[in-house]
Image: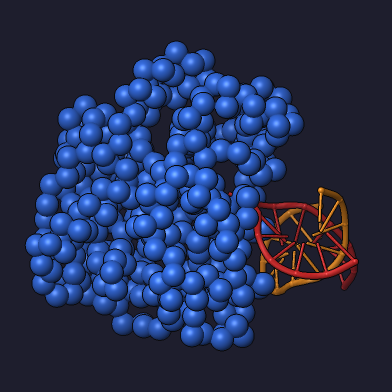
Chain colours: A blue, B red, C orange
Amino acid sequence: MSFEPTRLEIRQSVSLFPTAPFNFEGTVHKPSHFPSSDNVYESGRYWFTFRFEDDVFGIKLTDLGTIEAPEIQLEVFSSSEISKSQLTKIKSEVEYRFDMQANLIEFYKDYGQDNVLKPVLERWRGVRVSNIYSLYEFLIITTVLQNATVRRSVQMLENLFQAYGLKIQFDEKTLSGFWSPKSIHEASEEELRALKLGYRAKTFKRQAEVFASGEMDEIELRSLPSNDLKARLLTLYGIGPASVWYLLFEVFKRYDAFDYISPWEQKIYSRILFNEELVDTTKILQEVDARWGKWKMLAAHYIFEDLFWQRKTQHIPWLEALIRL
DNA sequence: CATCAGGGCCCTG
DNA sequence: CAGGGCCCTGAT
């Protein structure tokens, strides 16, 4: 627990060159995600805190390019000098998390004429699957999402940040930083329950235990085939069918991780694909598989984010009814 | 005031 | 493999 912000005053800068096309805003800012105090986006610039190999950093990304000629300035803020090799590691981890080296040309070519995707791809060409979190951190996100409204999810995460996280100051921003799993592993369940986490207190403790012990190696998991990876992730306490695909897709960039639809998502896909209020989930799954094959989750992601972008400027009554704040 | 569902999952029978 | 229980909140 720390009330005094940690200041990160040492700065290093390096250029990143994602594969083209690359859409900066659509990649770093996902309007369907709930807001959290560990990151902030302002036109063309993105700040987030980054716990990496037992150190804490501040990261700032600045868009310096265009969609067809992308270039990003990566600034790394730290409390002490970092070595060249450390900087290189951070750079490649950031590139991984924002899927900067992906090749989506085939996807754009094959689905540029798909009647559902076409307008979306025109608006969002170059958007990548992105996620600022480590696997452990993303487990926290999926766990606070479970069986809760958006507001409650936000409250739980912010309570955790206050109790176990860091306040990190860099580049005139003050953001929350994640704790290391060890601190929650060592916390009592009562202490966690005081943060209004309910039955999830137990889940957080068991997840922290796995990651504090190091038995789940995220880097190693990245090279597993999706089926094996999915099986490993499902062994995590608190991770079931609805959460596992969030992990497969957002953390591990498996573009086809789409074989489960939760009730609120079912209503959204029913509207978009069939223009009906409620279509059977089996039918939706068949439809997305037939339409988009190995790209099905990526396609769904584009559609979802596009919808939530539209929501920023237009009132979409049926969608509003589904978003329980 | 009570009751209930909500971006699920675990555990039991 | 179906269904009850679980924490807390805000809506009704």
Q: Can residue A150 be seen?
A: no
Decide which of A137, A197 is in the foreground and name it. Answer: A137
Q: Residue at coordinates 31% horizontally, 82% vertically from top-left?
A: A4
**Where in the figure is residue A205, as x and y percent of width and height?**
55, 76
Q: Position of residue A322 (x, y in %)?
A: 66, 42
* Left or right side of A232 for A126: left
- Give residue A282's quadrant in the image: top right
Q: Residue at x 26, y 29 (%)?
A: A21
User: What residue occupies the far top of the structure in this picture?
Assistant: A113
Residue at (15, 71) in percent of width and height: A9
Q: Is residue A247 left or right of residue A237?
A: left
**Which residue is drawn at the image coordinates 44% and 41% (left, top)?**
A254
**Is A321 or A177 nearer to us in this picture?**
A177
Above or below residue A223? Residue A204 is: below
- Give x and y (percent) for residue A96: 30, 48
Q: Determine the image quadrant of residue A221.
A: bottom left
- Picture quarter with the N terminus of chain A: bottom left
